[in-house]
Image: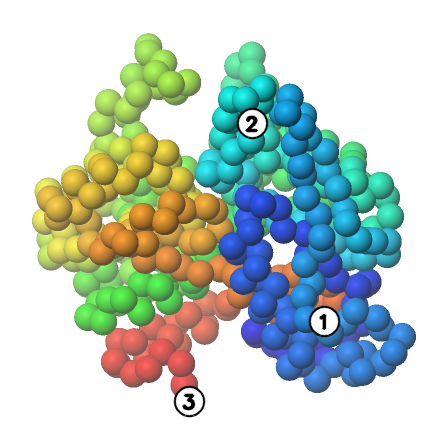
Amino acid sequence: MPNLHSLENALPVAPLKLVVMDSARKMGEEINNYLVEYRKSINNKFSKETGIQGYVEDSYLAKAECPRFGTGEGKGVFKESIRGKDLFILVDVVNHSLTYTVNGYVNHKSPDDHYQDLKRIIAAATGKAHRINVIMPFLYEGRQHKRSTRESLDCAFMLEELYSMGIDNFITFDAHDPRVANAIPLKGFDNYVTPFQFIRALLDVEKDLVIDKDHLVVISPDEGALNRTIYFANVLGVNTGMFYKRRDYTTIVNGKNPIVAHEFLGDKLDGKDVIILDDMISSGESMIDTARQLKEMNAKRVFICCTFGLFTNGLKAFDDAYEKGYFEKVITTNLNYLPAEIYERPYYVQANMSKFVASIIDFMNHDVSTENVQTPPEKIQKILSRYNQRLPLDED
């Protein structure tokens, strides 16, 4: 955990409690374990004072649940007092694996169901918590962030609704368009990005990369991902390129205009390794087509890095593309639910974010700037320098 010294004299806002929704159970337990480890190892003077109750605990997990009735109706329930606590509620709105019954029929939970359960837990707190912080890694309705015709503005409304219910902070990761925070200009909206975790995961599994502008290119699969791609390329000290999606605006399929072709803007890729960077893999069709075209342009190896791996059409298309040599690795984070079978795929690599999220929670609980948990470009470049010299990434 970075910059622990900044916590040594920091007073916590209130006793910490972590509410982990069923949708984020695996990651929530990892985060809790890191928090327990932090609190037991840090030399914080308040941890030894009897006036600060609950600073060092064996677990920070709150006992809360959202049971369902036979009709499908639900409710939020706390099974312990949360009066005066600093609540952090973790929810994964795209976990489709959870089910409930409605009059004997089995329903899979949708993002709407997870969002409703989140509101139930906030309502169950009944104003007794000292502070409520929502951690929603995948931004609910994040792709419906702007209005271009007669349509709903779901993401902005969600933010307004949560703050009207009394939350104090909202934390998300790699928002599809972070400008949606303009819907709540006087409220807290923290959007964290993941370049360091991607770099570490890639360097841990690929031992023969050369990180310079003559051997590596970072590619944006569309114009929407260009900003994050430029930052990533600048940190690595390499060049960038971009595809833009030429769409058929006379037709709508599954709620969107189908892509006619991907057009590439950038230098020649002959013999260079390529990193494709984006915020999410949905069905994966666009990403696979991008990788295929890069290979046809004589790219040496293709690595796909996406914060959220949704794989809404399953893994078969990726299995087939891997067998055809379109890409070498797919790297995603553990910020959202992933099917168990993906861990058996030879091409899959996970960038674990649990420790990073635990750091954010701990610093926010102390009201210390979360800049302390960010990785400065200088640190990334130092790791890259050691990698290029084939030295261990972490100094002894």
Q: Which residue is mark 2?
A: 101
Local SS, label 3: loop
Seen from the viewer's position, the closer of residues 30 and 295 is: 30
Camera-nearest residue between 59 and 167: 59
What quarter of the picture does the N terminus occupy?
bottom right
Q: CA distance from mark 3 to mark 2?
A: 54 Å
Which one is closest to the eye, mark 2 or mark 1?
A: 2
In this view, the residue in front, 357 or 216, is: 357
Q: Amino acid at mark 1?
A: Glu
> Identity of the amino acid at label 2?
Thr
Report the disc number at residue 57: 1
Give x and y (percent) for residue 331: 33, 54
Q: Residue at x 25, y 52 (%)?
A: 345
Q: Is residue 256 left or right of residue 28?
A: left
Per the model, the C-alpha gap separating discs 2 and 1 is: 36 Å
As helix, strand or loop, the secondary structure at mark 1 comes to loop
Q: Which mark is residue 29?
A: none
In the image, which is nearer the foreground, mark 1 or mark 3?
1
Q: Position of residue 170 (x, y in %)?
A: 67, 46
Residue lying at 34% horizontally and 16% vertically, measured from the top left: 253
Q: Residue at x 34, y 72 (%)?
A: 384
SS state under label 2: strand
- Given residues 269 and 8, the one toward you in this image is 8
Indicate which disc, 2 or 1, sits on the residue closer to the N terminus. 1
Mark 2 crowd level (few <14, some 14–19, many ≥20, 10 Å Cα): some
| Quadrant containing the C terminus in the rendered view | bottom left
Name the image quarter holding residue 33: bottom right
As drawn, is 377 to the left or to the right of 32?
left
Q: Is residue 369 visible?
A: no
Q: Quadrant of residue 23?
A: top right
How far is disc 1 from disc 3 in space, using C-alphas?
A: 30 Å
Mark 3, Cα crowd under 10 Å, few <14 / some 14-19 / many 20+, is: few
